[in-house]
Amino acid sequence: LFLQYNEEKNTVDAQIDAAAAKAEKEQADKDASKFLEKEKEPNKQFVGPDDYGRLTFSYPKTWNLYVASSTTESSGGFKAYLHPGFVPSIDVKDQRFALRVVIESTDFGKVVSGYDSLVEKGDLKSSQTSSNGQSGTRLDGNFSKDIRGAVVIYKVRDKTVSLFTDADTFKPDFENIIKTIKFNE
């Protein structure tokens, strides 16, 4: 009986130790996740050019910003890239970014209809969206073989504003960003 008791006690102790280790790991993962979210606060403020509708939104302070093109009409519009840490090269085809901002003079309807073939194939899902009273179009899904993400497209004055996220990894941050979008009418 004594041997059976010791064997059972060792088995139970091992199970308790395994459960405690699992609980500690789960708590550590949860704490790390909370820390990463807290580390992004307070947010930075993005402010686009006044002549392009003065687009503003809040983004995580751990992200960096790179403005790729000037605001002159000859440049074809305004382009900015945001990404955690450092912004990767914009010259690489199918490069993924946490957020891309494009403000262009192209008609809103033409920009949205440029995605019609992907919507018809089922690669993208189209829906209506609204941010601070401004309505627009949202597309979610596969934009190419390598890029799966989302875009919101708004008409601002005579310009079209598109905000892209190129990976599902950044969707929670993207959702928070689009809640803070504001334009000057």
Image: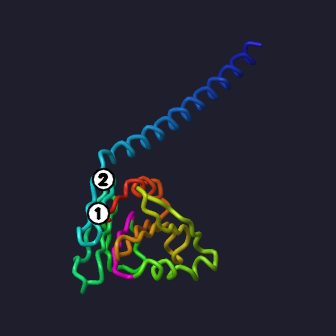
Residue ID at (67%, 24%): 12
- Quadrant of the rendered image containing residue 7: top right
Q: State whether residue 23 is above or below residue 184.
A: above
Please, what is the three-letter code of the amino acid marked with disc 2? Thr
Farthest bottom residue in view: 74
- Disc 1 and disc 2: Cα gap in Å? 9 Å
SS assignment at label 1: loop
The C terminus is located in which quarter?
A: bottom left
Residue 86 drawn at (x, y percent): 29, 63
Please name the residue that numbered disc 2 is placed on. Answer: 62
Q: Is residue 47 left or right of residue 144?
A: left
- Quadrant of the rendered image containing residue 182: bottom left
Residue ID at (42%, 62%): 134
Crowding around mark 1 (Cα neighbors within 10 Å: few <14, some 14 to 19, many 20+) is few
Farthest top residue in view: 2
Residue ID at (59%, 32%): 18
Residue situated in front as seen by the camera: 12 or 159: 159
Q: Is residue 19 left or right of residue 45?
A: right
- Residue 86 is marked as 1
Way the structure is coloured: rainbow
Residue situated in front as seen by the camera: 98 or 181: 181
- Residue 106 is marked as none
- Per the rendered image, the range of residues in magenta is 98-106
Farthest right residue in view: 1
SS assignment at label 2: loop
